[in-house]
Amino acid sequence: MRTLSAKGHAVPPLVDRVAALTSGVLERLEAENAPDLASYVSGKTKDILVLIGRIAHEQSEADYPAMDEDVRQRVLGDMFQLMVALSALGDVLKLAGRALSSDGIRPPPKRRLGDRIDHFLDRTIQIPANEIKHRGFDMGWLTLRSAFGVTHGYTVSGRVGSKLNAPIKYRDKDKSSPDGYSFAYVLRNSVTALFGICDALDAAFQASGCYVSPPPSPRSRAETSPAVTAAIAHINGLPQRGFFDERGLEVPILKQEDGTLTATMRRLRTHPPGTKVHFALNSVAAGVTYKLPYWPKNP
């Protein structure tokens, strides 16, 4: 079992520890026009957890192809907003990393911090978000259905050649990307990414001697938010089966006790051969070939 949050409150430990930053670090943060980290990270954590929970709840009521198209588009729109929110939080944490001292340290801590944040976000958050924002890629609803149940998600596809529309993975530089992204994996993984990127900044502060010694004791509290509690229940209600290329990936099963958020990691299962794949194209263009996800053969 892993402890994700600060004791007694579903926010990253970073929120409590920034009170122990040295005066020099605080001055450098102010010079970089960084926001107040405690209030910013605390507020964004709650907002992102509630958004993840809303998407988990809305997609759970889906039954493609009978699901209303407006509902599908709203869920996909919320998913894109989640990508944007996590990316923006990562950018602010990298900005805060500019307050790290680089004197005599190679590679510089702020570069290592950026690499660590990108490690958490690249595959499922930053790469698809950038393709959508900057290359005109589109999100299409994707469902796997078998005797073991239904798993909903999406694919991100666009022009990968002059006359070929395909998922991101068919671009030469993005071959490690998946055909599709299940909500069962991406939403749970977004929780661990949310706390992981904050822990990365916390670890960088510690490694660079940015905290006073000894640090002040954490505040004693046991706080719960009904919205966050409901979000955790919706997240835990996601299927235990993901898409074909998510087999074996670890996802968290969340628990909140006395305000503290913990996670037990479990490996995601997938659907067997012969599973039905339903995919919705938002639009088609004449003279363009469309490469569909998981077609003609499932992994």
Image: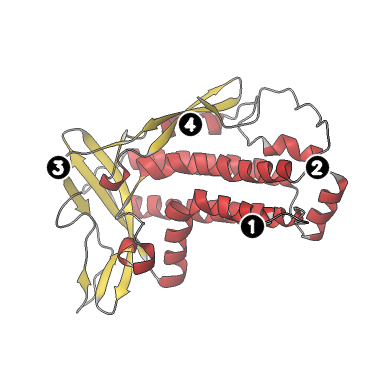
Q: Which of the 4 image quarters holds residue 166? A: bottom left
The amino acid on which the numbered mark 4 sits, given as a three-letter code, is: Ile
Disc 1 and disc 4 in contact, CB within 8 angstroms: no
The CA span between labels 2 and 1 is: 20 Å
Q: Secondary structure at mark 4?
A: helix
Q: Identify the mark nearer the N-term, 1 or 3.
A: 1
| Callout 3 crowding tier (Cα within 10 Å): few <14, some 14–19, many ≥20 | few
Residue that carries the numbered disc 1 in the rendered image = 111
Extreme residue in the right direction: 23
Residue at the top extreme of this rendering: 258
Q: In the displayed image of the protein, which residue is found farthest to the left?
A: 274
Residue 144, percent across and down? 22, 45
Task: Name the residue beneath numbered marker 3.
Answer: 273
Instruction: Out of 163 and 46, give the one closest to the viewer.
Output: 163
Work out whether mark 2 precedes mark 3 in sequence or the reverse, and give the earlier one: 2
Mark closer to the chain start, 3 or 4: 4
